[in-house]
Amino acid sequence: MLFSSITFLYFFLPLVILLYFFVPQRGRNLVLFAVSILFYAWGEPVYVFLMLAQIVISYVLVWLMDSFRQKRTGRIFYVLSVFLPFAALFYFKYFHFFAQTVLRLETKEIPLPIGISFYTFQIVSYCADVHYRKVKRQRNFITYAAYVTLFPQLVAGPIVRYSDIDQTLIKGTGFSDMHVNFERGAVRFAVGLGKKVLVANVLGEFVAEVAALGQRNLALSWAYAIAVSLQIYFDFSGYSDMAIGLGSILGFSFPENFRYPFIARSVSEFWRRWHITLGAWFRDYVYIPMGGNRVSMSRWIWNILVVWLFTGLWHGAGWNFITWGLLFAVLLVFEKAVVRLCGGISRLPVFLTYFFRHAYLVIIVLVSFLIFHNESLSGAVSDIQALFSSGGYIAVDTGETERLVWAYLLRNRIVILIAGIVGSTPLPMWFWTRIQERFKTCKTGEAAIHVVRGLLTVGLLFLCTAYLIDGSFNPFLYFRF
Amino acid sequence: MKNDRWKQRITIYVFLFWLVGLTLLIVICPKETVSEAERRRLAEKPELTLDSVLDKSFMDNIEKYLLDHFPFRNAFRRVKAHFAYDVLLQKENNDIYTAGAHASKLDYELKETSVKRLAEKMAGLREKYFPNQMFCYAVVPDKNYFLARENGFPSMDYGRMVTLLTEEMERAGNARYIDILSCLSIDDYYHTDTHWRQERLFHTADTILGAFDIEDASGMQEADYQANEVKDFYGVYYGQAALPMEPDTIVYLTNEVTESASVWSLEENFHNGKVVLPDETAAVLMPVYRTDKLEDMMSVDKYDIYTGGASSLQVIRSPKAATDKRLVVFRDSYTSSLAPLLLGTYREITLIDLRYINSALIGEYVDFADADILFLYNTAIVNQSEMLK
């Protein structure tokens, strides 16, 4: 089920709120589990059984692992608890690609269960955390199942670890916290919905319009690259906001997944701001166990390559994703080398250093998302070529009709492009915080702020509903992962 | 502190009020079957079966049903259109733009392969059905031809389209291009619809007749017709634009020639696998203007008044025509309103819409011998000729 659907907004969500807050605390995890299964089965009526099987198997294996902790068999159960979810993930997501590219076999493509990458990582992190005694094993099956299936984050993240929400699952939230969480969650959900429906979808239309053209000029090529990056950002961060907001409504505190990634000034900073929960997962469960950066230079480079190869592959079984991941690996190594060579000292004035570092990051991100966006590498190469030189999509000899089309497409979407650029920075939040500070000095002003916040929340819901009713362009990009 | 609580909870209250309020409205509001503004039948409630759940069609269809029957749907669509136009400063909504009182659909990509495919189609039909006959062809420009460039919108290269088509047909030989582009202006089209207006097609009709070397055989002028009006015609672009626009008025022209004429349609004469031909006594014949289609929303498109709307094959017989000549037109919906103006000249006009009938089948029903043959397609069809079977 899509968050941005009438079924979810006006049937599923009211039903969940009604059930969740009207049953006693001890019954809430059962409610969560039941509605989450309904949520998933709505989109995957068959693969829901795969997910349930994985939950049961991992629950039993962790139980056995914990019971035989001191023995060798305990370790075997741990290995199995990690191996089996990854085996399922490999089969559904990578087997076809692997068979075709490595084994040179013609195999039928296997439909990918929605969100399998996300819930696999959650199950594995739980198994590892129990094994390494970071968390206690959850003995109540319903509570464990509610953790894995928790519908706000089930199909597109953020990747929530058991330790993030175990206290809420076990103890629930207090009455006074409930109102604060609910209000915060409602606002966050509406903002996320707005990011998805009003920005990402509209940018997606522009991306589709330009992609349909045979040729384009330099300005349109750059606008296209910006739109692709912004679409992916607003789509995914919008989903994360909705997930965090829904979690908050239900009393959970999910980890942040995005922190204005486009204001970063290096690739390493970018990845501390983009899909934070995925980066943290690879850091804690792959990179650090491999030795992290406390190893020799060659081993460190190897660690980086492995982690970023997996990061690329996590997004999909395709050469574009592998290239995308390895590009970041190379850039991270490059950045480290530059810092070592320059010793972190620049002879340029600070603002110029900031400017060049930011410009470097923006260009890298635009290029990387063109690779990410394109299903074929050749398409990505043409898109990137169009940013810098003639050839590819850049027309050498164009007629008046083409020029009119290019100018029109850019003019038609210039506001949403500017809004997207501004919206991807902290500026709107900074502005809203300043307004709040200014008005909160008096009681009337404070009341006005609350009223405005409420009206803006419903205004966003209203506008998004209008867009959903009228529009048809509504895919969630991160569902395919 | 207690007094402050309402402030903190106001967002919760309005959020829940909005969600629950709309849920209740969705449930209790009466459901329409047809959207007059969008001129389409609305989705029906899907049946819940195991198969429909397993193949996910139930989930897809229930979402479509909810979207179609959402309370105040048109008002929501209008809000979206205003947001797109006035806030995002988009120049179109759902690819529909407005210029003056007119609405039109953006269509700027010229598909040269499609134009060539149409030329091949015409040449192939000639080879199969009327190898030794000359035929004429014409292209009806869409509204963008008149509106787009002067209002800053892109449009396809119509000159290139016509050049390509005529070059291809010159190679095929024995075909004459009729230039009706110069006969038309934007005022000859409805404001809210894609189609042209019948009452402004006399010059076009004369140009077509002239191409077949017929010099106004019927002798009928505009004054020989009585103009009848159908008010409140909301065209196809009205619904898509979702903006407030004044409705058009359909004018249909009648006289004793059109009133004596009758229309035979394949769809209405196809029963139990058998076709009742026009000459058979059991044939169902209808008047040229189907005013019955306006009653009880029998048709969601009032333009269907002209010969009854979409049909694969129609034969219009005009006993009071000035000649015994016959005309065969390979056509789209534009010809529906033009054909009645040709009934004063032709005793029989056959209308073939290859979007709805396979060209391999038409030989069973159509006699091409000694008939004037015309291909009349609007630019959208020329640019998407793959839809011609």
Image (cartoon, grey):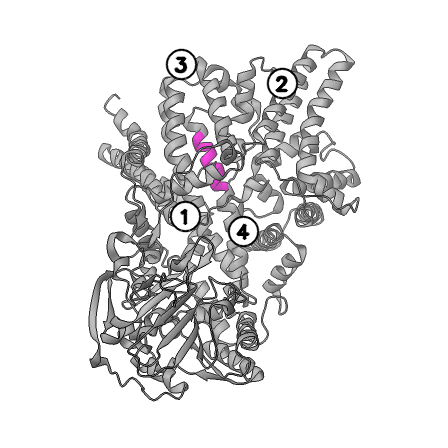
Q: How many marks?
A: 4
Give the number of the disc on residue A198.
1
Answer yes or no: do the residues labelled 4 and 2 have beta carbons within 8 Å? no
> What is the distance, in whole Å, between disc 3 and disc 1 at their CAs?
37 Å
| Sequence-earlier tag: 3 or 2 | 3
How many angstroms separate mark 1 from mark 2 (CA)?
Answer: 41 Å
Task: Name the mark on residue A59.
Answer: 2
Chain of the residue under label 2:
A
Q: Do we see residue A72 in this rendering?
A: yes
User: Is residue B161 one of those drawn in magenta?
Assistant: no
**The disc labelled 4 sits on which kind of residue?**
Ser
Residue that numbered label 3 is attached to: A24
Q: Which of labels 1 and 4 is toward the front?
A: 1
Q: Position of residue B113 (x, y in %)?
A: 57, 70
Marks 4 & 2 on one chain: yes
Give the residue at mark 4.
A229
Q: Is residue B38 above or below residue B54?
A: below
Q: Specify start and end residues of the magenta stretch as a single range.
A: A237-246
| Chain to which mark 4 belongs | A
| Upstream in sequence: badge 1 or badge 4 | 1
Residue at x 28%, y 30% (from the top left corner): B10
- The main secondary structure of the magenta stretch is helix
Decide which of A239, A290 is in the foreground and name it.
Answer: A239
